[in-house]
Image (cartoon, rainbow, N blue to C red):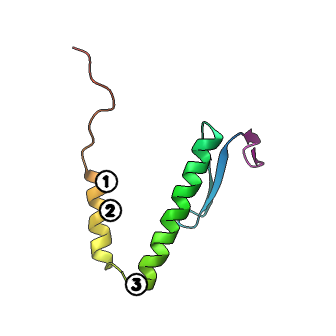
C-alpha cells in the first residue's frame, strides 16, 4: 500500500515517483503485485542502461535531443479501437 498524504488516498500496488524536471511527486497505480514488480524491474533496467551509456561516453547534442522529442510528439499513432461502420 502506498499512502499519499497530499491527496489523502491509500493505493494498493502503487508507485510514488519524484520528477526532478517538474519538481513534483507522481503516483502510479498497478493492477497487481506482479505488474508492479514488472514495472520496478523495467525501471531498474532503464537506469542501468542509462548509467552504462554515461560510462561509455554516449552523449547526444541538444539539437538531436530536441529533434527526437519533436518526432515523438508529432508521430501519428493508430487508433486504439477499430471504428464502427
Q: What SS does tag 1 mark?
A: helix
Task: Give whichever of 25, 37 is nearer the camera.
Answer: 37
Q: Nearer the viewer, mark 1 or mark 3?
A: 3
Looking at the image, which residue is at 48% across and 64% down? 46
Looking at the image, which residue is at 51% across and 63% down? 45
Q: For label 3, count other residues whose C-alpha is less than 10 Å away and answer few (under 14), some (14-19) or many (20+).
A: few
Image position, residue 2 (x, y; %): 74, 47
Image position, residue 84 (x, y; %): 26, 16
Numbered tag placed on residue 56 in the rendering: 3
Looking at the image, which residue is at 62% across and 57% down? 17
The part of the chain drawn in magenta is: 1-11
Residue at the farthest left position: 85
Question: Which quarter of the rendering shows the N terminus?
Answer: top right
Q: For label 1, count other residues whose C-alpha is less than 10 Å away and answer few (under 14), some (14-19) or many (20+).
A: few
Q: Which badge, 2 or 3, is on the more N-terminal residue?
A: 3
Residue 67 occupies quadrant:
bottom left
Looking at the image, which residue is at 55% across and 51% down? 39
Check the image and report above or below for 24 versus 14. below
Q: Marks 2 and 1: in contact by CB < 8 Å?
A: yes
Residue pointed to by mark 2: 69
Image position, residue 47 (x, y; %): 52, 68
Image position, residue 81 (x, y; %): 32, 26
Question: Which quarter of the rendering shows the C terminus?
Answer: top left
Check the image and report above or below for 68 versus 8. below
Residue pointed to by mark 1: 73
Check the image and report above or below for 46 versus 54. above
- Is residue 50 found inside the magenta-colored segment of the image? no
Mark-to-mark CA distance, 2 and 3: 23 Å
Number of disc labels:
3
Mark-to-mark CA distance, 1 and 2: 6 Å
Amino acid at each position: 500500500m502506498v499512502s499519499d498524504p497530499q491527496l489523502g488516498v491509500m493505493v494498493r500496488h502503487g508507485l510514488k515517483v519524484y520528477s526532478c524536471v517538474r519538481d513534483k511527486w507522481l503516483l502510479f497505480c498497478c493492477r497487481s503485485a506482479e505488474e508492479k514488480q514488472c514495472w520496478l524491474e523495467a525501471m531498474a533496467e532503464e537506469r542501468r542502461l542509462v548509467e552504462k551509456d554515461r560510462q561509455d561516453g554516449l552523449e547526444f547534442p541538444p539539437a538531436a535531443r530536441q529533434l527526437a522529442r519533436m518526432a515523438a510528439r508529432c508521430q501519428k499513432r493508430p487508433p486504439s479501437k477499430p471504428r464502427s461502420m
